[in-house]
Amino acid sequence: MASAAQPEQSIVKKDAHPFERAQLEGLMTKRFFYTQAFEIYGGVAGLYDYGPSGASLQANIISHWRNHFIIEEDMLELDTTIMTLSDVLKTSGHVDKFADWMVKDLKSGEIYRADHMVESVLESRLKGDEEARAKEAGQAPVASGAAPAVEEKKTKKKAQSAAVKLPDEQVAEFRRILAQIDDFNGEQLGELIKKYDIRAPATGNEVSTPTEFNLMFESYIGPTGQTKGYLRPETAQGHFVNFERLLDFNNGRVPFASAQIGKSFRNEISPRAGLLRVREFTMAEIEHFVDPENKSHARFNEVANLVLPFLPASTQKAGSTDVVKVSVGEAVSTGMVNNETLGYFLGRIYLFLEAIGIDTNRLRFRQHMANEMAHYACDCWDAEIHTSYGWIECVGCADRSAYDLTMHSNKTKRDLMVQEPLKEPKVYQKYVPTVNKKVLGPLFKKNAKLIEDTIMDLDQNALKQMQADLENGAAKVSAGEETFDVTKEHVTVEYKTIKESVRNFIPNVIEPSFGIGRIFYALLEHSFWAREEDKERGVLSLPPLVAPFKVLIVPISSNEQLSPLARELSKKLRSLGIASRIDDSSATIGRRYARNDELGTPFACTVDFASVANGTITLRERDTTSQRIGKVDQVVDVVKQLCNGRLDWKGACQILPAYTGTQDVDSA
Amino acid sequence: MASAAQPEQSIVKKDAHPFERAQLEGLMTKRFFYTQAFEIYGGVAGLYDYGPSGASLQANIISHWRNHFIIEEDMLELDTTIMTLSDVLKTSGHVDKFADWMVKDLKSGEIYRADHMVESVLESRLKGDEEARAKEAGQAPVASGAAPAVEEKKTKKKAQSAAVKLPDEQVAEFRRILAQIDDFNGEQLGELIKKYDIRAPATGNEVSTPTEFNLMFESYIGPTGQTKGYLRPETAQGHFVNFERLLDFNNGRVPFASAQIGKSFRNEISPRAGLLRVREFTMAEIEHFVDPENKSHARFNEVANLVLPFLPASTQKAGSTDVVKVSVGEAVSTGMVNNETLGYFLGRIYLFLEAIGIDTNRLRFRQHMANEMAHYACDCWDAEIHTSYGWIECVGCADRSAYDLTMHSNKTKRDLMVQEPLKEPKVYQKYVPTVNKKVLGPLFKKNAKLIEDTIMDLDQNALKQMQADLENGAAKVSAGEETFDVTKEHVTVEYKTIKESVRNFIPNVIEPSFGIGRIFYALLEHSFWAREEDKERGVLSLPPLVAPFKVLIVPISSNEQLSPLARELSKKLRSLGIASRIDDSSATIGRRYARNDELGTPFACTVDFASVANGTITLRERDTTSQRIGKVDQVVDVVKQLCNGRLDWKGACQILPAYTGTQDVDSA
């Protein structure tokens, strides 16, 4: 449906005024899509409030997400707590590893994220070098043609950029550092800071050595101060700790997927880049639990022919960012994408992003390099969307393997396993030890349990040896720092025939994880343009599927005769589930249209005196500004079809004749 | 629509097995509606995770809330941050006043909420007294016939209940204390504890004197530890700090309403009572901004004839809990409910609760007594729902007057005002002072600003006097602790004609605030019953509007011939937006029906061999267990109408003939 509208929209945009981020940001605040939180108190970096237009756009994106993933694929929805017991995040590794390195300006006390600071200073020096070389060559400075940033962190900083030429080998060295900036740990960042005399960009002061800062917000649960909690940094752990119940709900079988939409938190050191790096954000996460030995997907054929833009790790390693356009089927069969389930989700992610209005020419799937993977992941593809900040990771699609379930199982001693009945029982022989606790206990006292555990953990070879040793009188057990002699009285080892009718395994997890705020922002950039004839005002060409309001109702004047029809129209649309707004302000009709172009409202119905007399209304389309006319019920029906995707504007024009009223409504 | 289904549902329930809370709770865990969070780590009190059935039920309740309020009334939706700057909550009064009193067991260290502990111990003693008196009179102990608890806190405690007779005057005293337990402050609670030797219920140990514990979770924003934040205890402040932008979005006019659905947090001292007192919960809040001089509502007539059960403060003061059943129109015209807007929302709340399936015979609107009002409220009606815990506050509908906007405006020096153009300019005369800063500054130096501010704040009488004094040579200004002499050279006072064409005012706020988790729980209690013939298994008679899944699809056997039709049916329903589940497990069909009765699934479609041969399927209704038959598309159409409320089961029975297959499907 969105793709049907795409060509026309693209044509309109070709004539558009070039994109200016400041103009979009101005519109976002003015029409209250979003704003910095606590603005009247001076604001807090990295926290944003969504206003009516933004909240509605976000709700529509989420609603389509729920239909596209949860309903369409029978996923098990969850709503787990944000406040998370510290033990859980200790087990998952977040307490120890979910941290960034920070440095402090030794005089002002201002804090910087260490890698971002090093990056911005080195970039600045390279820029200065470029300028100096251009000057030397008598040329105007060239616009930086560097490869687009993989993350959004490439915002240029003001300070430390002077036209100073650097030695060739230093230029090469800086470039090498920047290419692998994600790989440095705190110590290494500290060495770079020392070696290249990197100072606080705002003041030029020296900075401290990097220290680690955990990105989770910390609090205490209850009044005793003894139960520590963190605000979750992802919704995923809420799925894992409920795995047993989810499995039970699915009658004990895999594959199945759970899904959750909710807020997560990261206490960023120094958030910038608007909605792209924030401290509180809405995520939508799927955890698809699958047999590690069979990662096929029952609906794979539905996406197998879909051609996606892939950027595999091998290409990046070769220093290129050229995407490979192949079908999902081919990507999986050649092994570029590891398995069907991963491939299936990449396809579904693509279809979702396309439907809500992301320009798929500015979308790519980038595979993580081995060194940038999160601590829990064994393979990962990011859906990256291109914006004025560069390429932004908007959806991560990671194979978390059995990492989390294994960790939680070890910690809690709960069996987080799938029991698969085997069609044919598995029969084999193995050595099985039996410990005689009654004798072992009194004899070895406090060491008895340790000895028993050690024996039970022995592998088959060791057990075979023990059986032989016991036959020969005694076997030695090394437990802790001591060695103990045991005899047949204490322990026996038998070579038994085992018959297994059930296979136990910890499932693997494929996790598509959506940053709704980033998708939201990218969508706004892709939808925003300005008409060449009205550069000051923007237009948001949002698809009807997600537009905050679908229809603007405009009474042509404030004459009271027009109100009943406007209200009736509003009621009719509402009963069809179509969100509309009446604008009966005293602004000119052209101004009212323009205001609603800014809100991304795709259609407008004008109520005039002909409407009252003849029961007709006009229908205006936002992107083309063209107007058609029809009887009220006919127009309502066309709008309904336009909104549910059964009709595009071209089709609508075949049903409704052009409006030929003598009055030029748009410029009234 | 829900009301259409109500009578039938009630009939079924009349034959039902008596309600047992433990049975409902067992069902909730078994079918994963909700469970204690971090259960595999031992759990945390007051934190709950919602599983697939619960999350879906909750999402459906919220979805209807959004339609009923936001869409239907053109409210401005917001999504503001959970993490809240401490300054904001300092201004709103929460940092100072949002606290409970706690006491500590002096030996074990266990912490109790002071009022709850006093209450439970006194209740226990009264119960012991009742038992002793019954024994004395040779009767069996009487079931406590006390008036239903207003809050859910009346959970009986195990300890300190012995059959000990109390003096008559002490019984009366305890009853008086219990009736006003909400009114005691920490010092008074401490006195009660001393006077009546109240000890920790679990151990019998002495407890500490009560200390205050703020109920907000505290954290720090950013790495410096200097910016304090709290997790919001309500969503309301997010509306107020954005008031300027909301007003602007609404073209500068009131009334309008903003609405927000989201998580809030209260760090309860010692949460009990399941979902009714939790530390993290979903709220849905409306802030309706209205002219304080005109609280009429444009759509009031839509609810004016609706008869509601009111429990006004006057009735409660007279010691009664008998509700008054009158129409909203009468309630407002007699002044029992203060204004139309408040009345309108009480009506809308009633209709919402009725539609999602709350038994309106167990619903009342209770007015707050003056002493129990929150610190910001000037009038408040709670929608209370009766459950096995007593009457529970589920929706608060408070008139917060201009409290919050005034506080934020004072603190931030921002004009949080509505400017209403006056039809006729207001003309009047007043005394206006003018300060000559050029002279005042050099003369009074550091006191100059203080003197100026003092003069500008003088009232009309004082200015009149000052004018006269200045005419006579000099006037005195008392500023700070000093008095200064000023002359005409420093300040002049003129009697001016003022013409005002705009009226400035801070709007009042009417706030309907919904605790979604409490409504969710009450709905489950109202929907739960067990068939007399199958007491072990529960049925949840949830209306189709909110039921987690609408249709169960049951292939009668695992024969592969049946799968395609089951899948096709599922796809057809999905395309109509109807959530279904296929249960192709090997359980008997009766067992599969019963399992879905537990999930509240209202309809089941059985696919059998006749379906494949004749294209027919049977349709089973959950509450009556009656079954009808029809062609696939006809059944799908009936289900669609049943789900969107255009048809009830009686109507469905007129369209589809009874199923007369020889096989008794329910007991297969």
Image (spheres, coloured by chain):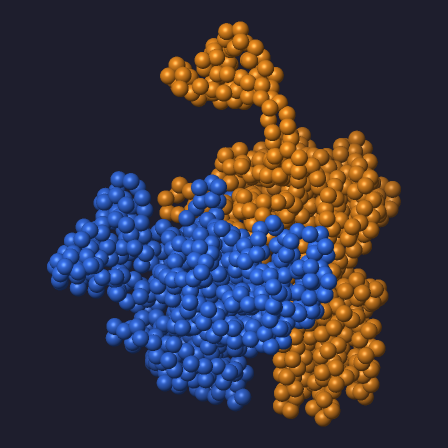
Chain colours: A orange, B blue
What residue is drawn where x is 49% and y is 51%? B30
The mark tally for this picture is: 0
| Residue at x 68% of width, y 71% of height | B634
Image location (x, y in percent) of residue A96? 55, 35
Which quadrant holds the N terminus of chain A? bottom right
Quadrant the C terminus of chain A occupies: bottom right
**Residue shown at the point (26%, 65%) measured from the top left:** B146
For the residue pair B13 and A202, the one nearer the viewer reads as B13
In the image, taking residue B253 as reference, residue B20 lies left or right, namely: left
Viewer-closest of A558 and B43: B43
Instruction: Note whether A335 is above or below B116 in the view shown.
Output: above
- Residue B467 position within the rendered picture, expressed as x and y whole percent measured from the top left: 37, 80
Residue B598 in view: yes
| Image position, residue B139 (x, y; %) | 17, 60
Vertical position of residue A298 compared to residue A462: above or below: below
Residue displayed at 77% across by 67% down: A530
Pick out the residue farthest to the top: A472
Q: Nearer the viewer, residue B568 or A72?
A: B568
Residue that sits furthest to the front in the current view: B662
Residue A513 placement (x, y as % from top left): 65, 49
**In this picture, residue B226 sits left or right of residue B367:** right
Would you say residue B83 is visible in this rendering?
no
| Apparent side of residue B118 relative to residue A645 in the rendered image (left or right) | left
